[in-house]
Amino acid sequence: MDAPQKGIAKSLLVHDGELDDLREVLEGIGTPFVERRGALSADERNTEWSVILSTPNRMLSLRVPGTPVRIVVTDQDSKTLRNSLHRADTKIMVRRPVHPTALRGLILHALYRGPEKRQNQRVAVGAPVRLRAGLRQLPGILADVSIGGCGLIAAQPLSPGKSFSLSIPGEVAPGKAYSLKARVLSSGQVESGRAGTYAIHAVFDPTPSQRKLKLLKETILAYRSGPATLPKGERANSSVLRGVAARGLGTPAPATSSASERREDPRLEIEQRVVALDEEVDRMLMGKDISIGGMRVSPSPHLTRGGNVKLALHLNGGSPLVLAARVHRDDGERGVVLRFHQLSAEASSTLMNVMESMPVVAPGASGSDAGYVVSELLEVNG
């Protein structure tokens, strides 16, 4: 395929004909990638890739700038090979046989996981919202928003630590009104010489419902092409919005572009596909420390303590192992601990066999945390 488009995660597949199945997985994901059979060109050697997928021999000879996520797929395994790949900064080694869904999950995690790619995406909005703190209701302007929180302009302050509900009307969201629980981080008067205008920075409740999380992501997507339109043609961003509010120019009007115009924008179509993949990767969990009793998985907004889930573990090239589990503990960035329950004798036997030879390995690792398994979240209850 041709060189990847700017602004989109860049993947490189380099091999000598052994990894045709990986090409099919990448094509199925739909993200731009470059495939090279044999040695890289000069331009490819000077490109900062996001993800590199390769065979052991090709990976060990690669010298490229930056710190790409390196994934090796191989039929072989040895301590010497693992150590060599570890020295070459390879993060993941996948031993065949491996299910295509597991490969897809690994690549999605490498491309779309991470705070720099998702959690900190902040867009300027500049549209009217309402705040409710106890019995108080305040009109405000949503200056900017991300998955984790927002900036607001209001006529009255809210004390740091104060909890409130942010109501986003359908005119601001993509046609569906919703509300989010939030907590004030800071609140201060805008330095404008005019009383009664305050800038509020807040964080959202980290466990919104799946519906509200989806609507929030859609809101962020809707404003990535630009904020709401200000009076007199002014273009908005966070600092301009504060100035607009301070000068008393009124509330910014909603963006004038129609939903159909947004859908016809090729860049927005690409971004919408990325959001859809982002939803998928939230369901693909990297599991480790696996035992008959349970395992630790990567953080997910869908997992809350005490909840019951159904998982599909992609352990080898065959059918996945479907298990029921309960969310036992949330250890933040270290992941979420799941406890299996209602294990059949067949499932227990399968787990015992897999624990001896996990399909995904962190090269250079040893002990109980050396192996990983890609699992898919099928159901969440409670």
Image (spheres, rainbow, N blue to C red):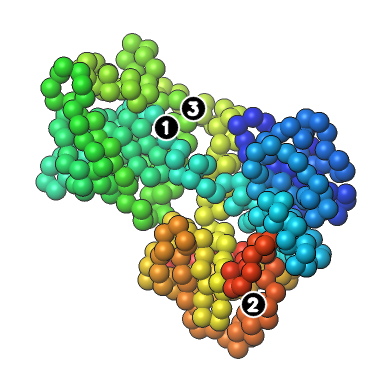
Eye-nearest disc, 3 or 1: 1
**In the rendered structure, which amino acid carries the disc numbered 3?**
Ser
Q: Is residue 287 above or below residue 145?
A: below
Q: Which residue is drawn at 40% across and 26% down?
A: 227
Residue 28 or residue 352, whichever sits in front: 352
Q: Which of marks 1 and 2 is nearer the N terminus?
A: 1
Residue pointed to by mark 1: 123
Q: How crowded is mark 1: few (under 14 residues within 10 Å), some or many (20 or more)?
A: many
Q: Residues within 10 Å of mark 2 (few under 14, many from 20)?
A: some
Q: Earlier in the sequence, mark 3 or mark 1?
A: 1
x%, y% of residue 142? Answer: 30, 32
| Helix, strand or loop for disc 2 | helix
Query: Which quadrant: the N terminus?
Result: top right
Give the side of residue 181 with respect to residue 363, left or right.
left
How far apart, in angstroms, are the residues tagged by discs 3 and 2? 47 Å
Residue pointed to by mark 3: 225
**In the rendered structure, which amino acid carries the disc numbered 2?**
Met
Query: Which quadrant: the C terminus?
Result: bottom left
How far apart, in angstroms, are the residues tagged by discs 3 and 1? 9 Å
**In the rendered structure, which amino acid carries the disc numbered 1?**
Val
Q: Is residue 219 above or below residue 77?
A: above
Q: Residue at x 73, y 39 (%)?
A: 64
Residue 355 is tagged as: 2
How far apart, in angstroms, are the residues tagged by discs 1 and 2? 44 Å
